[in-house]
């Protein structure tokens, strides 16, 4: 994300205008309009928490609608409620998964549909996590609440390609036990994975909970995790305090990776609203390092 | 509360008095903000001025291009950071008002949007403003004037140059130049006229946002649940917007003409407001809105003798 | 050089309207604004019809951007029955189109649009369909409105090298010069109607390079700046009622140097072209404004300049370089909606508001700051140029006169401690 730009006030005109005979009329739909969704089918709905459900979406041809990199986004629409951008939490040959919290009109409507409901789906969008950068390194995943959704795609990728990465540590928390998402992975699947530690915390004590109690941002320090590459996702307030804590613990700004959330309409860096400074979250993000964020206006 | 009257013989003298009053108010810490006018980037443009310190008072001017009805800024529009009624601890805000502006101030007070005690009102006798591009012509927004002298003030700068009444005796909405034209049109032609207006609208909402009686915290056109009007620009949605807005301000419109002056497409917004406003004045036989504190807006109260032919 | 008498211009329009969708600047429907008779009023580009008079005295009130990027674009229809959803894409029909009589500033703004819609990862299908099939006939300016400041933004009002055809106003006649292949093909349709003037310059030569004798827009801007040094904001601010009448002292700042410079700097055929008689009233120094703004995000300037903003979208909708859009629904029935793409404005409070209520730009301070940083810094970083072409529409239209020219002046005057 270079902030260096051409000093010339009006540099050369761009040569991107396609060369074609201007005297030729154009009619009909273009083959690949990135703004037009494909028809998708919500084939499976999993209730994760009282307000989070995971939707498995299959393309009209029975295969997954698109192939996202970990951390990339998809635009899901349900008529007549409009479109919104969600991170893809998992994928296989037949579907992609999106874990969605009910917060607004579209997400509440999604929570009310049944399996078999058709929808619109387009993507993938955004940069995704820097897999090459993470390759061979120890990774610490720090997530709070629904922030587990974007990191899960990367955790799953690392588990599937276990030998490509060093030690994996997951620090995850939510308000209560009921609000923890992906409990199967947290308590059954991932603890069995080689050289992988799972630390789960909830905000307040509750009956039957034997694990750690406390907020996510302070947990890594209590665990005395050694500085390495970390991936932080969660609500803005959690990210803010987690980044402060990691800085204090000696994590390097270029090794702290996080994801941003802004309102989006197009997903292709044109509609203008998801900018943080001169970066568009839908195109240049949603994944940024702390170093990059420090160079951007604090307007998110 | 019409306390003090200061006489000023010309615009230079008015400006002088404005600055003296403003400086004094700030120095004695009676107010912490003064809403006035300053010169814009061109000789024929003026702009709202927000004066916080005595050293800023020399920015204040009054000339024939001080169109802005500053009362809207008392609402901190559109997101109310400076909404003065909500904030009792702060000092008063002083505001300069022309005749029409003072009416909208009364309207906002009657609607409980602001409290009278929180504003210090400095009235100015309005000479009648001029068109931006032809200083020999009375500004169109001033043609539908009801009062050149403010109807409410704490202090008034009065001037012999005050705008005289129309020679034909018509006042306010009655004086709208196109009223007869639109009334005499056959229905089809009239329909086409409004269609043309709605078609030309770009829905920038300047008319709504500048309007001092559009004081809703959240406008119905900004709501998404339910979504009353589509965002697309088409004659039907544009018409829906204009007609609903006209109905919402009917009986409350103070004829300041800011909506039409602000329209980048020069649409005849005031013609719609004038026709509706005049109809309400005639139908209910009531005085124009917000001329004093005694009568609330016509459609905001009920009288047993109100006409009810439609029931 | 090919010319036609102004009185005969309708014959050209008539001929071009056959093979092309021809859009021309026309006066608005409501032209009764006093003092504005004959001026731009609500003028805009409209599809040519016989007898529709060409409005060429001043630039149009609305920029021609809606012909490449319509205010409302129907994208697709969604029909839902029970659990099924059907998506029907709308066809994008686009006949070869001529935009006739675009001013230099608006030609520059199309360069801005090109950068947004054709660069940076994705190409916009709608824009990419229209843009190559659109032929730009630029019209030189012979006068300017009080609000124009294009020369301050590096635009030459006499000449648009990137247009397909340059039309120059020669007083009684218009001259036509093709600058691209598309322009030459278009002019071939009207060749018989144009008369050749011998010996006044190269005719029909395609744009290859700028001759050395021509001044660049930057040079022209410098000349304009030095000439108009008197007519700054402060002189405007001092003027009283009496000096604001028609015979403003500002017009005395006219200087033949600018005319001479513009003579040279004009297009190949402009030697005989009538020119603006006086320098633009508004001048701003846009040099280094981006670099300065890099350290001004937290500057108190934003606390001050946002105060009069009403949060309407007038500036963004009349701006020829504003490109933000929304994608939303037009409900046709309980089963059928049309998805449409509409202009949106970053000045609206719900523009960045997210589901759940969080808004990264919650008040007008953040929104006003974002708009001006976007024009003067962010787009420079992202697309390599300032996104203001000095057309002056926001200067003319902002209800509270919070326009970019004043803001640039205030930025340049602001004290900044480098971080």
Image (spheres, helix red, strand yellow):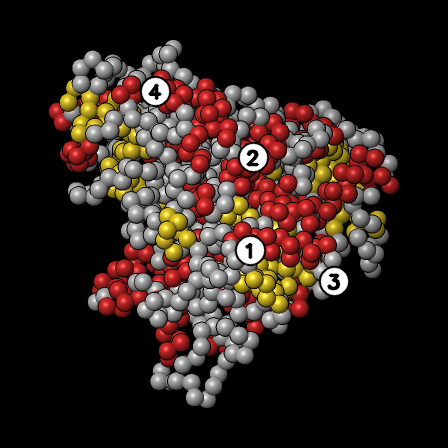
The disc numbered 2 marks a residue on which chain? Answer: C
Instruction: State the image coordinates of residue B10 (x, y, percent, origin top left).
Output: 51, 55
Cα separation, mark 2 vs mark 1, equals 29 Å
Asked if B248 appears above or below C170 in the picture, the reply is below
Labels 4 & 2 near each other (Cβ < 8 A): no
> Label 3 near label 4: C-beta < 8 Å?
no
Which residue bears the numbered disc 4?
Answer: C263
Question: Mark 1 to mark 4: distance in Å?
Answer: 47 Å
Is label 2 or label 1 in front? Answer: 1
Task: Give the residue at mark 2.
Answer: C409
Q: Where does the image place residue A168, in percent across and percent down from the top left?
A: 75, 33
Element assignment for label 4: helix
Q: Nearer the viewer, mark 4 or mark 3?
A: 4
Instruction: Work out how far the residue at label 1 is from the one at label 3, CA to CA, in angstroms.
Output: 32 Å
Marks 2 and 1 share the same chain? no
**Is circle 3 on the same chain as circle 2?**
no
């Amino acid at each position: 994300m270079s902030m260096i730009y051409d000093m010339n006030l009006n540099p050369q005109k761009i040569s991107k205008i396609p060369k074609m005979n201007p005297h030729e009329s154009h009619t009909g739909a273009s083959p690949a309009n990135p703004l037009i969704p494909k028809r998708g089918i919500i084939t499976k709905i999993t209730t994760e928490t009282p307000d989070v459900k995971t939707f498995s979406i299959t393309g009209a041809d029975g295969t997954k609608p698109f192939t996202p990199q970990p951390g990339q986004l998809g635009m899901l629409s349900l008529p007549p409620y409009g479109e919104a951008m969600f991170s893809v939490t998992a994928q296989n040959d037949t579907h992609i998964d999106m874990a969605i919290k009910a917060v607004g009109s579209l997400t509440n409507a999604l929570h009310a549909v049944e399996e078999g409901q058709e929808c619109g789906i387009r993507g993938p969008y955004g940069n995704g996590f820097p897999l090459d950068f993470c390759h061979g390194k120890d990774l610490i995943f720090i997530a709070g609440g629904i922030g587990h959704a974007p990191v899960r795609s990367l955790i799953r990728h690392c588990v599937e390609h276990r030998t490509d990465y060093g030690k994996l540590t997951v620090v995850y928390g939510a308000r209560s036990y009921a609000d923890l998402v992906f409990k199967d992975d947290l308590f059954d699947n991932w603890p069995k994975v080689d050289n992988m530690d799972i630390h789960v915390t909830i905000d307040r004590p509750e009956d039957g909970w034997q694990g750690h109690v406390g907020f996510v941002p302070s947990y890594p320090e209590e665990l005395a995790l050694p500085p390495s590459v970390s991936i932080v996702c969660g609500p803005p307030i959690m990210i803010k305090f987690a980044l402060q804590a990691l800085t204090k613990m000696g994590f390097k700004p270029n090794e702290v990776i996080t994801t941003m959330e802004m309102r989006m309409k197009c997903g292709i860096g044109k509609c203008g609203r998801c900018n943080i400074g001169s970066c568009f979250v839908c195109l240049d993000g949603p994944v940024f390092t702390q170093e990059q964020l420090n160079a951007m206006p604090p307007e998110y | 509360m019409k306390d003090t009257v200061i006489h000023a013989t010309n615009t230079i003298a008015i400006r002088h008095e404005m600055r003296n009053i403003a400086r004094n108010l700030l120095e004695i810490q009676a107010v912490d903000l003064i809403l006035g006018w300053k010169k814009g980037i061109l000789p024929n443009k003026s702009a709202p001025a927000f004066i916080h310190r005595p050293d800023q008072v020399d920015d204040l001017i009054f000339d024939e291009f001080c169109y802005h009805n500053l009362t809207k800024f008392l609402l901190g529009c559109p997101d109310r950071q400076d909404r003065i009624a909500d904030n009792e601890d702060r000092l008063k805000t002083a505001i300069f008002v022309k005749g029409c502006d003072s009416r909208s101030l009364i309207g906002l007070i009657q609607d409980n949007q602001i409290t009278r005690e929180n504003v210090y009102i400095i009235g100015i006798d309005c000479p009648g403003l001029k068109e931006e591009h032809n200083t020999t012509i009375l500004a169109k927004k001033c043609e539908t004037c009801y009062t050149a002298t403010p109807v409410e003030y704490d202090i008034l700068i009065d001037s012999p140059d005050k705008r005289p009444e129309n020679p034909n005796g018509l006042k306010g909405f009655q004086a709208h130049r196109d009223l007869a034209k639109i009334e005499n049109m056959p229905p089809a032609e009239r329909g086409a006229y409004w269609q043309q207006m709605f078609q030309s609208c770009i829905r920038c909402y300047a008319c709504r946002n500048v309007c001092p009686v559009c004081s809703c915290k959240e406008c119905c056109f900004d709501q998404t649940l339910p979504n009353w009007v589509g965002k697309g620009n088409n004659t039907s949605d544009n018409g829906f917007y204009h007609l609903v807005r006209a109905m919402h301000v009917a009986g409350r419109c103070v004829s300041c003409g800011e909506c039409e002056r602000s329209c980048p497409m020069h649409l005849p917004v005031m013609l719609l407001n004038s026709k509706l406003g005049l109809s309400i004045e005639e139908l209910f036989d009531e005085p124009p809105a917000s001329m004093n504190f005694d009568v609330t807006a016509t459609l905001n109260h009920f009288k047993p003798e109100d006409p009810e032919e439609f029931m | 050089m090919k010319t036609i008498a102004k009185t005969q211009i309708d014959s050209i329009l008539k001929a071009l309207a056959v093979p092309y969708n021809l859009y021309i600047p026309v006066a608005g429907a409501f032209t009764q604004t006093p003092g504005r008779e004959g001026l731009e009023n609500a003028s805009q580009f409209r599809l040519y019809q016989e007898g529709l008079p060409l409005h060429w005295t001043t630039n149009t009130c609305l920029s021609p951007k809606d012909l490449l990027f319509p205010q409302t674009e129907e994208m697709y229809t969604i029909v839902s029955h029970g659990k099924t959803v059907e998506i029907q894409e709308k066809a994008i029909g686009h006949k070869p189109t001529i935009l006739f009589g675009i001013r230099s500033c608006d030609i520059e703004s199309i360069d801005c649009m090109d950068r947004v819609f054709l660069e940076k990862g994705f190409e916009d299908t709608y824009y990419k369909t229209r843009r190559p099939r659109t032929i730009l006939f630029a019209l030189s300016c012979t006068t300017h409105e009080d609000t124009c400041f294009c020369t301050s933004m590096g635009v030459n009002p006499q000449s648009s090298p990137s247009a397909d055809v340059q039309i120059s106003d020669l007083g009684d006649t218009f001259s036509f010069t093709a600058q691209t292949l598309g322009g030459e093909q278009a002019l071939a349709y009207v060749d018989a109607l144009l008369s050749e003037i011998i010996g006044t310059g190269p005719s029909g030569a395609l744009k290859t390079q700028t001759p050395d004798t021509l001044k660049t827009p930057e040079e022209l801007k410098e000349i304009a700046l030095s000439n108009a040094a008197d007519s700054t904001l402060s002189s405007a601010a001092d003027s009283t009622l009496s000096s604001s009448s028609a015979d403003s002292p500002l017009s005395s700042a006219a200087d033949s140097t600018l005319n001479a410079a513009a003579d040279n700097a004009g297009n190949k055929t402009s030697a005989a072209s009538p020119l603006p008689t006086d320098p633009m009233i508004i001048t701003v120094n846009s040099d280094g404004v981006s670099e300065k703004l890099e350290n001004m995000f937290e500057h108190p300037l934003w606390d001050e300049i946002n105060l009069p903003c009403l949060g309407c979208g007038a500036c963004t909708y009349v701006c020829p370089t504003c490109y933000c859009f929304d994608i939303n629904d037009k409900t046709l029935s309980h089963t059928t909606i049309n998805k449409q793409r509409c202009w949106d404005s970053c000045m609206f409070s719900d523009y960045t508001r997210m589901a759940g209520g969080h808004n990264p730009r919650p008040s007008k301070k953040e929104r006003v700051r974002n708009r001006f940083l976007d024009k003067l810094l962010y787009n420079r970083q992202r697309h390599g140029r300032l996104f203001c072409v000095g057309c002056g529409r926001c200067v003319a239209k902002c209800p509270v006169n919070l326009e970019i020219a004043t803001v640039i002046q205030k930025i340049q005057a602001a004290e900044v401690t480098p971080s």
